[in-house]
Image (cartoon, grey):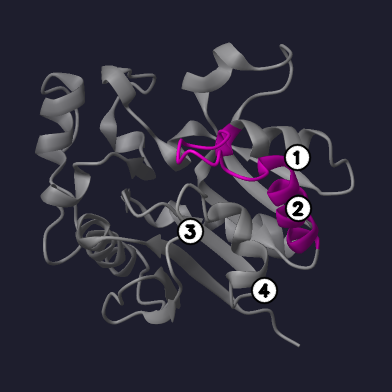
Amino acid sequence: MKQTIGIVIFVFGTEYHARASALVRSVRCHSRGRRIPITIIGDAPVEPCNFIEVAEPHGLCCKPLLGHLSPYDVTLYLDADTVILSPRAWLPFRLLRRKGFDVAASHARRCDWRRHCDVFPRLSSGVIFAKRPAADLFFQRWRLAYGQPPPDGRRGKSTQYTMSDTLRDSPDIRTVTLLPEYNYCPAGGERYLSSPDQIVILHHRDAHKHVGEDGSLCRGWLSRRFWGGLGGT
């Protein structure tokens, strides 16, 4: 039986609804005619995507719950404030379907200063490729590592660190580390790419404001905002 492939986005609140709408347009823009199914999981639909309504779990991150919420055999999870900038975004699907990997996530370079050892990079939880059945085991273990949120409403544990630790401690789950370009987070103005044209998936809270109706991002904004006007078209 052919494996189903699709994208899952969690959306809670009107602010993230606007971001998800821009993300969906960017997916269509760079899918080269492929109709990649998209499922919105949250409190309101985003047209023209599939929709699974769930109540927002206060104080609890939904990402470790993907194992039983995703309707696809091979899932690309995207944070709502990401934007696709290149058709290369779909290449990791091949790694999972043809090369036998179970999970793929990008190197979170800005988090390496808190890594446990010098040989294991921190992975970002904002963009995750996962393939069943091993992915179900991964999400189950991640959910246990993440635990319950504090009763006083404070934020729970870091999804990035608990995810990275789960994969590090799961030799039975074949994991591939993607380049930072697959979840580029220019936090604090940090730039570790020579040009914005290298970015495959951008992760920034304001990016949706610069995505056109055709799904393309204004590269001029990206260049001016993070590269001082250098690079980009």
Quickly name the residue at label 4.
73
> In whole angstroms, how far apart are the C-alphas of marks 1 and 4?
19 Å
Q: Secondary structure at mark 2?
A: helix
Q: Secondary structure at mark 1?
A: helix
Q: Name the N-terminal-most of marks 1 and 4.
A: 4
Q: Is residue 7 left or right of residue 233?
A: right
Identity, as a three-letter code, of the amino acid under mark 3: Pro
Identity, as a three-letter code, of the amino acid under mark 1: Leu
C-beta proximity under 8 Å, tags 3 and 4: no
Q: Name the N-terminal-most of marks 1 and 2.
A: 2
C-beta proximity under 8 Å, tags 1 and 2: yes
Q: Is residue 7 left or right of residue 202?
A: right
Which residue is at a point 35% across and 52% down the rendered structure image?
86
Q: Name the N-terminal-most of marks 3 and 2.
A: 3
Q: Could you say which disc has been placed on residue 57 in the image?
A: 3
Which residue is at a point 74% across and 47% down the rendered structure image?
144
